[in-house]
Image (cartoon, coloured by chain):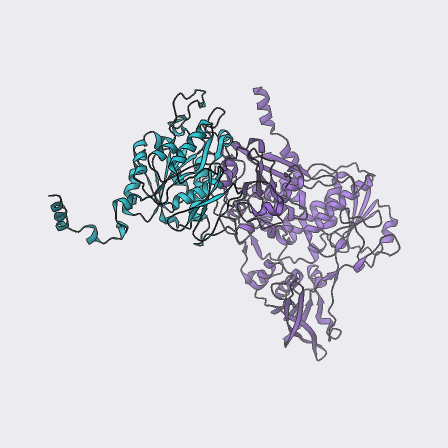
Chain colours: A cyan, B purple
């Protein structure tokens, strides 16, 4: 059993604009099951952050509880991080974000942590449009407790023991569209060509970005009859708007050109380039997104890619006009203005 | 690209860079692992089977394996393969080794062979053919066997006991040694009742340097290889105080270090090329400099300066080397001249083959450079009974190449004398590919990669080393260091074997691979494919391992170049589509029997089999 990854790397490893190879963005060897989709997502996050030229220590990895929430241990080990209470990652991230919104906030959660115990927090963080990337590593089961169906398990999906799930699934993408998320996407852990540019676009988006990533549980939910297995997902996936993330200066092009393209500029000068399979599809329209999503669902297809984006919407900081300067950079006098300032505030309420 | 055929024995052989680069294809990682397990006699036997002279080569090999070592591509220095071989030889259990030497049949097969010259090529032929029942006469002009290994490699690099032991392992098989006998006529040899004759006489003629003063200074000018031989056989016991060596190869290094030990106070090496372009092995140059012997590069000899009728100095022109775009060298004089006082000059500027004793009308054709016409695969000359090997075949090379020639010549002789075709019926290499999996994440080899840098082998203090030409100057690795150095080996013979049908394309292997060797991409032509892999794929000498088409329409492509053989891909594979399998490749010798090590590894463990049968 290997306990560490050898230090030797490819001698010609490419470097990003900061002169860094991907090594400083990596973490120790994962202890998740071999073949877990979560590990692929970790690798995609490494590639995305490296490609965005963000220094590893300018990132904060936030998570709750579960296999998914354990995975931030295995990437960006030079970044900040907080492994919070089950389902409470959004509130901890809100606090962190308010006190320092210069960091890149990557929340990693699972279907249990988001759609069951964390549902309330998930709903509210979306409607507040907190500036963060919220990744749901969605495998439709509770892998950490031996594979019981989770709230995102599809109706009719068969468990490893052969039991059919009788309950309707919570569609996190539909929920996000309904609750006002300003960047909504879905992807698959087994398709980095799609996932990496989506992550980069989500990280460059200035509001709440949800990426629901189907991430098969190899141990408990990768059998025939499961609707979250590698095979089922590959057979039913349908890329809607395929995203190519275009940074400010250079252009990344996807391998295959599909249909026409449309650029949606993000606030910092970068943009998302969309290749559309369906000419009619407009990912800047929430109504169109909901319709397309429902249509695909009715056909038994899994719609992936960028489903909706509103790059203009005000985020939480802008709405509340919180401090633009991180609190750790404000002096003592600003942070603790003294009892006279408190008196003034209290006077204001009289 | 077409899917890689891993059943082709050469595919995985090529991945074991060191073994592939070795002329005799010694299974290097196999014996290094045995050294790591402190099984020195076993490691010695793996070597002995393949290269006949582990103790000698562990000190003197030209090491074609080390520049090929994969470790040198991921960090500064390759594994110290050569010195590890010496560890096996120095720490073997002599009784254990003696008991494992091949049995020599007392009933002979009635075929008689003459070997001319008792160097490594001839000794290898004898080693391979004696166990098959041949009668062998070994001729040499000197009093002991070993050839150039004895006459040209000084004792401070190769102690006599080591040489004697390994030469005797062969001659004690019942070889009839005819020493102190210079063969001066091939016609006469052919007239005797030999079924085959093998010529392993080396390249015995040292080059001379005809510049002004050569004749007058003759008494003080020595030809390097002759002089070394004369020292080795104690005909020469001392040299003058100021010695100039001309030449930059390994012979020059041996000459200067010998001169320093038998009277040369001021010894200087001069070479026409630059220091970097010298032919000597880098470690030989290092050892020379460490003994306080200066190496003057860019010195082209002009004249032996004679005073009072004898050699007083040597005059050199200082030159400059420049290379054109094709790497062709031009040497130009700068106009500057240097004169070095000296009492003796040793010329070590190369050696030639010479066959004055082979008559030109007996059916052995000679071609370019007065070299015999020899087949590169069979080592047969144009005379069907006469075979050549070692330096005598294609000019000066090294010991390990001579051994490789010897093995192949022995196969040819054995086939020819049994009425078989020596080109069509050569035995195929023996191979074995077996999983090292012992548990979910357990392998039968040390898969963890150590980050230690190459260890230096210890030397005697200089004063002590220079006190006698017979004291070995290098001490070799102590056992703890040997273990650590052995652990540096990346186990390139433990192959990453991919099974398409099991792969679910989860990317686990791609994500974990420290050196980004593995990619899942749409297939294409090799040049195009190399552009689209996870990491730059620049070393075109290293193969791509391409799978059959996978369900998503992509293929798995592994660039073998900098794979660390760490097993992480297999550990992170949920379906065991990757497996770490040990590949053993052995060159089959005369007699077409699998190498003992291969037989051992192919036989299932008898205890285990018994248990299994009982359980059933």
* Res. B266 image quadrant: bottom right
Position of A87 with respect to B144 (left or right) is: left
Position of B253 with respect to A235 (left or right) is: right
Q: Residue furthest bottom?
A: B308
Query: How far across and down, in percent of the image, does residue A214 sit?
Result: 44, 33
Decide which of B322, B544 is in the foreground and name it: B544
Decide which of B441, B504 is in the foreground and name it: B504
Quadrant of the drawing holding the C terminus of chain A: top left
Query: How far across and down, in percent of the image, does residue A311 sit?
Result: 37, 44
Query: How far across and down, in percent of the image, does residue B587 sit?
Result: 69, 42
Number of numbered discs overlaid on the protein picture: 0
Residue in view at x 37 percent, y 28 percent: A170
Residue in view at x 71 percent, y 51 percent: B402
Q: Residue furthest front?
A: A280
Decide which of A68, B458 is in the foreground and name it: A68
Decide which of A184, B225 is in the foreground and name it: A184
Residue in view at x 53 percent, y 60 percent: B461
Evaluate whether residue A26 shows in this view. Answer: no
Position of B195 with respect to A41 (left or right) is: right
Evaluate whether residue B417 shows in this view. Answer: yes
Query: How far across and down, in percent of the image, does residue A81 sit?
Result: 34, 43
Residue in view at x 49 percent, y 49 percent: B452
């Amino acid at each position: 059993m290997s306990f560490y990854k050898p230090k030797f790397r490819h001698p010609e490893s490419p470097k990003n604009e900061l002169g860094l190879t991907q090594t400083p963005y990596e973490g120790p060897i994962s202890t998740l099951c071999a073949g877990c989709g979560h590990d692929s997502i970790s690798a995609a996050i490494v590639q995305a952050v490296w490609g965005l030229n963000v220094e590893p220590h300018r990132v904060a990895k936030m998570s709750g509880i579960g296999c998914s929430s354990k995975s931030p241990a295995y990437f960006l080990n030079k970044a900040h991080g907080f492994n919070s209470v089950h389902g409470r990652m959004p509130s901890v991230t809100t606090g962190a974000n308010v006190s320092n919104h210069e960091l890149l906030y990557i929340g990693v959660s699972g279907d249990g942590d988001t759609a069951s115990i964390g549902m309330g927090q998930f709903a509210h963080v979306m409607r507040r449009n907190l500036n963060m990337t919220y990744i749901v590593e969605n495998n439709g089961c509770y892998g950490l407790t031996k594979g019981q169906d989770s709230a995102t398990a599809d109706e009719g999906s068969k468990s490893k023991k052969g039991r059919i799930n009788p309950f309707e699934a919570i569609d996190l993408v539909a929920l996000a569209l309904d609750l006002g998320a300003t960047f909504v996407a879905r992807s698959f852990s087994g398709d980095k060509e799609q996932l990496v540019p989506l992550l980069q676009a989500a990280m460059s988006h200035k509001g709440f970005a949800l990426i629901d990533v189907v991430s098969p549980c190899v141990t408990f939910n990768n059998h025939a009859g499961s609707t979250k297995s590698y095979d089922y997902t590959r057979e039913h996936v349908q890329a809607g708007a395929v995203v190519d993330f275009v940074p400010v200066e250079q252009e990344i092009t996807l391998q295959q050109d599909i249909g026409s393209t449309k650029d949606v500029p993000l606030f910092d000068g970068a943009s998302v380039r969309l290749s559309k399979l369906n000419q009619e599809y407009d990912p800047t329209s929430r109504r169109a997104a909901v319709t397309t999503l429902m249509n695909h669902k009715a056909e038994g297809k899994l719609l992936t890619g960028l489903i909706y984006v509103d790059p203009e919407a005000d985020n939480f900081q802008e709405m509340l006009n919180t401090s633009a300067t991180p609190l750790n950079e404000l002096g003592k006098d600003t942070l603790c203005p003294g009892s006279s300032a408190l008196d003034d505030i209290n006077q204001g309420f009289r | 690209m077409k899917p890689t055929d891993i059943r082709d024995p050469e595919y995985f052989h090529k991945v074991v860079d060191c073994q592939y680069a070795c002329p005799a294809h010694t299974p290097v990682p196999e014996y290094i692992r045995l050294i790591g397990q402190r099984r020195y006699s076993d490691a010695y036997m793996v070597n002995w089977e393949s290269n006949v002279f582990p103790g000698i080569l562990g000190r003197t090999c030209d090491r074609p394996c080390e520049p090929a070592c994969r470790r040198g591509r991921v960090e500064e220095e390759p594994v110290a393969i050569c010195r590890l071989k010496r560890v096996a030889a120095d720490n073997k259990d002599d009784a254990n080794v003696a008991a494992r030497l091949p049995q020599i049949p007392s009933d002979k097969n009635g075929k008689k062979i003459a070997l001319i010259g008792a160097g490594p090529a001839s000794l290898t032929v004898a080693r391979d053919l004696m166990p098959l029942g041949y009668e062998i006469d070994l001729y040499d002009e000197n009093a002991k066997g070993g050839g150039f290994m004895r006459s040209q490699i000084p004792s401070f690099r190769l102690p006599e006991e080591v040489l004697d032991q390994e030469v005797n392992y062969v001659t004690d098989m019942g070889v009839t040694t005819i020493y102190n006998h210079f063969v001066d006529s091939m016609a006469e040899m052919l007239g005797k009742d030999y079924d085959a004759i093998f010529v392993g006489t080396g390249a015995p003629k040292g080059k001379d340097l005809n510049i002004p003063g050569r004749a007058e200074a003759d008494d003080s000018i020595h030809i390097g290889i002759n002089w070394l031989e004369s020292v080795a056989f104690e005909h020469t016991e001392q040299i003058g105080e100021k010695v100039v060596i001309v030449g930059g190869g390994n012979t020059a290094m041996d000459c200067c270090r010998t001169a320093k030990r038998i009277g040369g106070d001021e010894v200087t090496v001069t070479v026409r090329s630059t220091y970097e372009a010298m032919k000597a092995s880098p470690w030989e140059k290092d050892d020379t400099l460490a003994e306080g012997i200066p190496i003057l590069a860019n010195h082209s000899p002009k004249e032996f300066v004679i005073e009072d009728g004898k050699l007083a100095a040597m005059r050199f022109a200082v030159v400059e080397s420049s290379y054109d775009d094709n790497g062709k060298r031009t040497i130009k004089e700068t106009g500057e001249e240097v004169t070095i006082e000296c009492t003796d000059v040793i010329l070590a500027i190369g050696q030639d083959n010479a066959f004055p004793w082979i008559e030109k009308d007996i059916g052995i054709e000679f071609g370019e450079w007065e070299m015999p016409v020899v087949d590169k695969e069979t080592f047969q000359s144009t005379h069907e009974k006469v075979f050549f090997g070692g330096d005598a075949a294609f000019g000066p090379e090294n010991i390990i190449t001579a051994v490789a020639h010897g093995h192949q010549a022995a196969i040819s002789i054995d086939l020819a004398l049994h009425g078989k075709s020596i080109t069509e019926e050569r035995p195929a290499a023996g191979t074995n590919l077996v999983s090292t999996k012992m548990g979910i994440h357990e392998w039968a080899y040390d898969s963890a990669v150590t980050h230690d840098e190459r260890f230096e082998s210890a030397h005697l203090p200089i004063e002590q080393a220079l006190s006698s030409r017979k004291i070995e100057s290098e001490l070799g690795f102590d056992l703890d260091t040997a273990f650590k150095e052995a652990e540096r080996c990346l186990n390139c013979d433990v192959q990453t074997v991919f099974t398409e049908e099991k792969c679910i394309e989860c990317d686990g292997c791609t994500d974990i691979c420290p050196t980004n060797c593995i990619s899942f991409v749409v297939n294409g032509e090799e040049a195009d494919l190399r552009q689209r892999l996870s990491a730059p794929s620049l070393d075109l000498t290293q193969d791509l391992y391409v799978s059959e088409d996978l369900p998503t329409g992509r293929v798995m492509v592994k660039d073998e170049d900098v794979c660390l053989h760490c097993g992480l891909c297999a550990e992170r594979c949920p379906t065991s589509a990757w497996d770490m399998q040990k590949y053993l490749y052995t060159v089959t010798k005369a007699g077409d029997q699998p190498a003992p090590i291969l037989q051992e590894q192919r036989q299932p463990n008898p205890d285990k089999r018994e248990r299994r049968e009982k359980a059933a």
